Image (cartoon, rainbow, N blue to C red):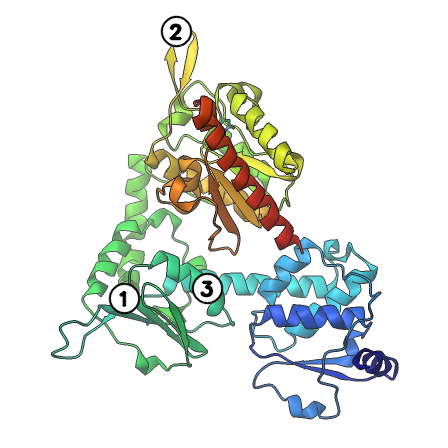
Amino acid sequence: MREARSLENVRLGTYYVVQLPEPDDFGFWRERARALVQCEVPPDRIAWVEPGGNGDLFSHGERRAPVPPPDARAVRANKRFMALAKNAALHSDPDRFALLYRLLWRIQSNPRMMEDKADADVRRIEELDKAVRRDSHKMHAFVRFRLVEPEEGDDDAQEHYVAWFEPEHHILRANAGFFMRRFSNMHWSILTPQGSLHWDTETMREGPPAQRGDAPGGDPMEELWRSYYASIFNPARLKIGAMLKEMPRKYWKNMPEAALIPELVAGAQKRESAMVEAGTLEFEERPETLEAIDKAIHACRKCPIGELDNSAVMGEGPRDADLMIVGEQPGDQEDLAGRPFVGPAGQLLDVHLEKVGIDRRAAYVTNTVKHFKYVQRGKRRLHQSPGAKEIDTCRWWIESERAIVQPKLILAMGASAARGMLGKTVSISKVRGEPIPLEDGSELWVTAHPSYLLRLDGPAREEQARLFDADLAAVKERLEELAR
Ligand code: URA
C-alpha cells in the first residue's frame, strides 16, 4: 500500500523534502538518496534541509521516504564519488547535499562522469572535499589542550585538558577518532561553536556547542609548546605567504607558540644560511603520484639502509585498490627483481590469499621499508630486520602511497609493517583479528608475516597457518562488507 502511494507520488510530480537529522549525517543522506534514485525522483524535485535550515518553506512537500519498487535497479556509485561525497557532506555549504544527489543522479546514466574534470559539478565536489580535508588538517595541527585547574580541595580530580577550536566545516565528529587515538590516556574536551567532545580514556561523549570563554586561557604547558615549536621550526621551509595560508591568523590566538612567530621569522634567514653551510637543509614536498614516489625512493638516503648495495622496491597494484597489503621490507629476491613479495614469503602469501579467495592482482602490495637491509655472509645476503628508527624514517613513503591509493583496508603483516602504519610497536597476538580505525577513515588489520610461518614447522606451523588464514578470511569478509 505504502509502496503504491510512493510510486503514485513520484508519478504525480511530488516534491520531496528531506530533513537531515544532523549536518554531518552522510549515512542518512546515502540511504535517502538511494531510495530517491531508485524511485527515479529527479534532483529538482527534492529539497535537502539541514538542521536549522528553513524546512517550513516546503510545507507542501512529501517528507516520507519513497519506497523503491521490488525490481528497482541497484544504484551505481563509484569509489571516487563515494570518497569525495563522504567528505563533501561535511562542508558548510547549504547546497552540498543537493550537489551530491545531482552527481549521483547523473552517474546512473553516465558512470564515467567523475572523470570529467571540466564538469562544473565534479569541480565543485572536488573543491568541497579539498576544503574539508584542509579544515581537518588544521584541526589536527592547531588544537592546543590547556590544563584546567582542579577545584580547590578536590585532591582526587583527574587532570583535565580542554581545547577550543573553531572549525569552518562540520568536521568535529569525523575527527573524534584522531584525537581519541592520539591522546588516548588523557581526559580531554574539545569545545567548538558546533558542539563538544569529551574523552575520559574510555568513552567519548558529545556535548552542546560552547563559547570561547568556556575554555581556559593559558597554563604552564604553554612554555613547553613554545620550546618544542622553536626546536622543530625549519627556517628552510619558511614561506610567509604559505604559512599564513596554512596557519591563518584566526588560529594564532589559540596557539601559545604563535607568540614566537615574529621572532622566528626574523631569525629564519640567518638560520637557513647556517643550515645550508652545515648541509642539514632539507625540503620535503609530499610526492603526488606513485611514479614520483618510485623515483624518490630510489634516491632516498635518509637512513643507512639506502647506502647498501640494493635498489628500492616500489609497491605494485591498482592505483585505486580497496586493499593495501603491507610487508616489512623487500628480501633478496625482491631486491633483484625490483618487485615486492616475489620470493619465498611472497609465494607462501600467494598460496594463502588464493586459499581464502583474495585476488592479489586487485590489491596494492607494498612494504613499510623500501630498501633491503642485510649483512653479507660470503656470497649470501642475510636479511636483517629494520630498526624502529629506520621504519619511522621510511613511514614518509608508505604514507605517501596511502594518500594516493586511499585503500579502504590495510593489511599489515608482521610487527614492522604494523609499526609503519601506527607509528608505535604493537603485539601481533593482541591486535590481530580486529579492525583498528585509522585517521583517514580506513581500517588497519594486523596479522603475522608469512616469513614467520616459513621459519616454523610441524604443529606450530599448522597452528600459525590456521591463524593466518583466519585473519585473511576476516579481511576478505570485511572488504566485501565495505564494498556494499
Ligand atoms: N618480505 C617482505 O616483507 N616484503 C617483501 O616484499 C618480501 C619479503
Which amino acid type is marked by label 2? Gly
Q: Verify CB contact (< 8 Å) between mark 3 and mark 1.
A: no
Marks 3 and 2 sit apart, C-alpha to C-alpha, by: 53 Å
Task: Determine the image quadrant of residue 86.
Answer: bottom right
Going from the N terminus, do you reach mark 3 or mark 2 first? 3
Residue under the image location 55 percent in, 40 percent down: 472
Q: Which mark is residue 175?
A: 3
Residue contact at pointers 3 and 2, CB within 8 angstroms: no
Farthest-out residue, top: 378
> Quick one: label 2 or label 1, which is nearer the N terminus?
1
Q: Quadrant of the C terminus?
A: bottom right
Picture coordinates of residue 406 (x, y %)? 57, 49
**Does the CB distance between marks 2 and 1 fall below 8 Å?**
no
Q: Is residue 348 above or below residue 207?
A: above
Closest to the observer: 103 or 76? 76
The residue that label 2 is drawn on is 378
- Estimate the x, y position of residue 421 in percent, counting from the top left: 44, 44
In the image, taking residue 309 as reference, residue 148 lies left or right, namely left
Tag 1 residue: 256
Mark 3 residue type: Asn
Q: Amino acid at mark 1?
A: Pro
Mark 3 sits near ligand 1, with its Cβ under 8 Å away = no
Whether residue 113 is situated above or below residue 352 in the rendered picture: below
Which sits earlier in the primary sequence, circle 3 or circle 1?
3
